[in-house]
Image (tube, rainbow, N blue to C red):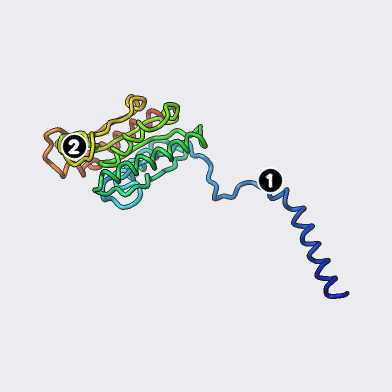
Amino acid sequence: MDPLRFATTRAAGIATALAAAWPIALTMPLSADAAPCPDVEVVFARGTTEPAGVGAVGQAFVDSLRAQLGGRSVGVYAVEYPASRDFEVSTPAGRDDASAHIQSTAANCPDTRMVLGGYSQGAAVIDLATTAMPPPVADHVAAAAVFGGPRSSFADSLSAGPLPSIGPLYAGKTIDLCVPNDPICSEGGWDMGAHGAYIQTGLVAQAAGFAASRI
């Protein structure tokens, strides 16, 4: 056969095969990379200067919550933000990322029950996020847990603006925990060691129990 004619015929055959396969490709199921919506998703904001992820308090909270939810699937989203001491920039960045993710989950996974959480500056991130979202989003949030949130005059002196508080639609489903004498959340507190004692004092496990009871 003439080489040019053979190449033309072969190309036409490939094109025909691709055209025939195209509708099948459109109807193939999503790959395993497209994870299904979990039963529960924890959205957690770490504390100041902690490395990227959910931080030590966040991981302990997730582990304790998972242990109390039996076979239900639990997804985790670590709020992406600097968690730096430049609070004027860092905290609003966290608010925006948390708010965007929570709203996206509510829209795309309407049956997923969300649990919000934050430690230290991360607690302020969650406070601000709950006041920034449209009211219907609150229906998708089962519980919120904040640890060592900025509530004191000392914390106010470190802040670039007024101290935030949890949004009204979330107040009844939130547990706000403060270790005694933690100067960030306790007025007149003096023990900075208390600010790092949320796991060993059992407050993280307490918060996980609260969240699990609402799911």
Depicted 112 relative to depicted 11: above or below:
above
Q: Residues within 10 Å of mark 2 (few under 14, many from 20)?
A: some
What number is the disc on residue 201? none
Q: Which residue is mark 1?
A: 27
- Helix, strand or loop at disc 1? helix
- Look at 52% across and 37% down and name the residue there: 108
Q: Are marks 1 and 2 in contact (CB under 8 Å)?
A: no
- Give left or right: position of 143 versus 12: left
User: Which residue in the protein does label 2 denote?
Assistant: 156
Q: Residue at x 11, y 39 (%)?
A: 190
Secondary structure of residue under mark 2 = helix
Q: How many labels, in total? A: 2
The quadrant where residue 65 appears: top left
Residue 47 against residue 214 in the figure, above or below: below
The three-letter code of the residue at mark 2 reads Asp
Q: Quadrant of the C terminus?
A: top left
Q: Is residue 30 left or right of residue 119?
A: right
Comparing 173 with 150, the one in front is 150
**Residue 160, image quadrant:** top left
Rendered location of residue 199, percent (x, y): 25, 42
Q: Residue 157 at x, y = what percent?
A: 16, 39
Tell me the CA gap for discs 1 and 2.
Answer: 56 Å
Given the image, on which type of amino acid does mark 1 rest?
A: Thr
Q: Quadrant of the N terminus?
A: bottom right
Q: Nearer the viewer, residue 12 or 145?
A: 12
Q: Earlier in the sequence, mark 1 or mark 2?
A: 1
The local crowd at label 1, few if under 14, some if 14 to 19, many if 20 or more residues have their Cα within 10 Å, is few
Give how far across and how far down residue 61 sits, in percent. Answer: 33, 40
Q: Nearer the viewer, residue 27 or 97?
A: 97
Which residue is found at the position 16% from the left and 44% from the top? 193
Which mark's residue is nearer the viewer, 1 or 2? 2
